[in-house]
Amino acid sequence: MKWLRNIIDVWFYDIKNALLDEGALVFFIIVPLLYPLLYAYLYGNEKAFDVPAVAVDCCNSYNSREFLRMADGTPDIRIVAHCADMQEALEHINRKEAYGLIYIPKEFDRDLMSLQQTTVELYCDMSGLLYYKAILSGCTDVSLQMNKTIKASRMPGATDEQISAAQYPIEYEYVPMFNTQSGFATYMIPAILMLIIQQTMLFGVGMIAGEEREKIRKGIAEPHLIGKKPHEILIGKACVYFAIYIIIAAYMVCIVPQMFHLIHIWDWRTMLAFMFPYVLSCVFFCITIAGMSHDREAFIITFVFMSIPLTFLSGISWPGSNIPHFWKVFSWIMPSTLGINGYVRISEMGAHLADVMPEIIGLWIQTGVYFIMAYTVYRKTYSKQLFV
Amino acid sequence: MHQIKQILAIARREQKRLLSRPIYLFCMVLAPIFGFVLFTTLMREGLPCDLPAGVVDEDNTSITRELMRNLDAFQQTELVKYYSDVAEARNAMQKGEIYGFFYIPEGTTEQALASKQPKVSFYSAASYMIPASLVYRDMRMMSELASGSIMRSTLYAKGYTEDQAMAVIQPIKCEMHAIANPRLNYSVYLCNTLLPGLIMLLIMQVTIYAIYVELKESTASKWLGMADNDIVVALTGKLLPHAAIWTVMGILCLMWLYGYWHFPLNSGIWPMVLNMFLLMAAAMAFAVFLCGLVPSLRWGLSLATLWGVLSFPISGFSFPQMAFPDPLKALSYFFPLRHYFLIYVDQALNGRPLVYSWQSLAMQVGFLILPLLVLRRLKTFLLEYRYTH
């Protein structure tokens, strides 16, 4: 049982090392604890409510004023100014006091009275798509509502059902599933949680590995590693990272969604069967990549920038079905892609084991491949130490 | 004259250092180019097309089949599969096979023809926000059209012209004009800030690394010695070659965005060149400021990492700043990328006169003052601190 004792030796020494090293501690504990809170707080409003808009009402009739009043009354739009002409309205938009413009033409009322179709022109500043969404959906809702009233007034003596059937021979209903209010936090945060697990682990592991290699280069031997075989060191260290991150993962899966009322309808068996290989594949992935780390700090600056592309490669923002083939294959190198997709579907969409089986199998394959690669890295790094 | 000579000497020394370490090549040239290519080719479609969606057609008449064929013809949606019931379609969403589905209950056609107002529904996997909202848009349009077409045929039968019929069906119509990005190109919407953001992130990291690695390798006193311990001369000399490389990368980024991809450039190129330079200078200044705050490579880099990564959400190009909680709204002013984004919106996107961007321009210039506040501290750190493990 010498090997077991060796592994436990490495584990005890390294967990102490990891938790006492201030640099690693930042990435292992502080960032994973605080970043999710920061993001959840940032996106907490879920949507852009009351997007400021200006109105140009050339008609100035009862109906046009009614339209603007109703638009102002929607949760999406707030009318901040009524302008005399487009010039004045554009000035407001240029000064960023408003992001949308509702233009009601002079013929508005005349068209309605003479039974012609009339058009309300909307303009939107495209600096944010949520502005576009708010202005468009707010005004469309108002027009549908007003249309109904107008049509009712043109059908004297009709019952509510008749009016309704005339408006919509086929009624329709939209059900946004899983993210029931189409909120931004609900959509973005699960992806960020999974990415934080992989990236912070990568920085922390890279820092520790870099420091060890610096010491090896300087001929300083780590006393606790002497006489241990590479696979014992690998398993011992992997268990350290695994132990830390299984707690972090539990915090992200159980506590963060609870705190910020994010949707979490997961089934615990599925979640467990999924998070176990995810954290494990991250551990061996990080150890493998950290094999490139030759000093403590250089490693971080080479990999921080990857956090941003990885969010987009996961298919959570730009749809996965439309990611070009090359990038799709590239994205499968990192556990985060499978991790984000699987987690979103389990946690928010209530997927069961069978639904995420491809992701789980993929993560196990990554675990296997990266285990072998990590072992190769360790054999190269620590073979010298064996004979010290 | 003497100082200029010193600066040049230090710059030559830094140039050698930059060339001798692969990490600089990687972070200053390869990583930005990788990022430029990745983001723009990833989103080269502009607006995602043919998103997979499904149908549950319990009615299955020639009319409903016709309807679904029409939906398939919409640009953003592609019907990949018919499902036998809602549970099966829902399960396909959970498996990630489709982003939404259309549900037509039994008897829809019959009830519609008898004016009994049947109800159809459509579902989307809103956890995937962008594809879900695009599929939603097509399905809603389809439902409107379906209703409209039934009414229209009734009205035509009564002798209405097309215009008259439309006026009856939809007395008020809304028409949207998306200023400067009429096709809702996602690449325009995101890459214009993502790419410069990537440069900013890398500048902050590399600048801090280049300064404090001197402390780690115990060469800081030699470096300052070359400038007679004048920190301004020492920093200028050191950062001069960096500035030259970043200038090339910044110009490359602008050429890539506005030259190759032809993103909207309503202001002409010069305001954007100014914007890019200010962003890069502000990032560098901010990095020097962080160096002066914390006397350690490790902490400096950790801070720069947190600040740099946080720049992306807090600059408000995806989730708008107006929806942030107030403290974070205030905090967002301290991120150079936020101001870059605002200037970009004014200039390249909307082509407004430069004067409308004055506040952001002033803030960017303000960042350049930050290093002055910590120069003395930084000098003390460099001369007196020792790198410790």
Image (cartoon, coloured by chain):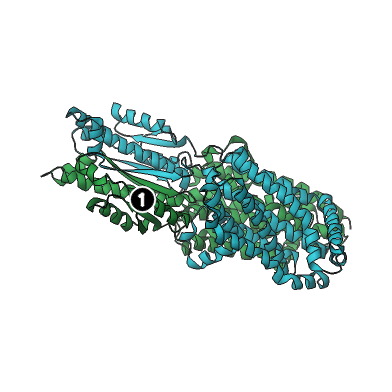
Chain colours: A green, B cyan
Which residue in the rendered view is the most extreme toward the top? Answer: B62
Instruction: Judge whether residue B113 can be spotted in this image.
Output: yes
Q: Is residue A216 left or right of residue A289?
A: right
Q: Which percent across, then down, holds residue A119? A: 31, 42
Q: Is residue A59 left or right of residue A293?
A: left
Which residue in the rendered view is the most extreme toward the left? Answer: A157
> Which of these two is toward me, B293 or B388?
B293
The residue sitting at 67% across, 61% down in the picture is B304
Specify the quadrant of the image occupied by residue B143.
Answer: top left
> Which of these two is toward me, B75 or A67?
A67
Q: Is residue B7 left or right of residue A31?
A: right
Q: Quadrant of the N terminus of chain B?
A: bottom right
The residue sitting at 80% across, 68% down in the picture is B231
Provide the chain ID for the residue under circle 1: A
Q: Which percent across, then down, holds residue A314? A: 57, 46
Specify the quadrant of the image occupied by residue A81.
Answer: bottom left
> Which of these two is toward me, A193 or B243?
B243
Three-letter code, disc 1: Ile
Q: Is residue B236 left or right of residue A318?
A: right
Q: Quadrant of the C terminus of chain B?
A: bottom right
Indicate the secondary structure of the residue bearing disc 1. Answer: strand
The residue sitting at 41% across, 56% down in the picture is A51
Q: Which percent across, then down, holds residue A39? A: 53, 60
Give the answer, above or below, for where B88 lies relative to A211: above
Q: Which percent across, then down, holds residue B119? A: 27, 41
The mark tally for this picture is 1
Instruction: Judge whether residue B27 can be spotted in this image.
Output: no
> Which of these two is toward me, A361 or B140?
B140
Q: Which residue is mark 1?
A: A102
Label 1 packing within 10 angstroms: few (<14), some (14-19), many (20+): many
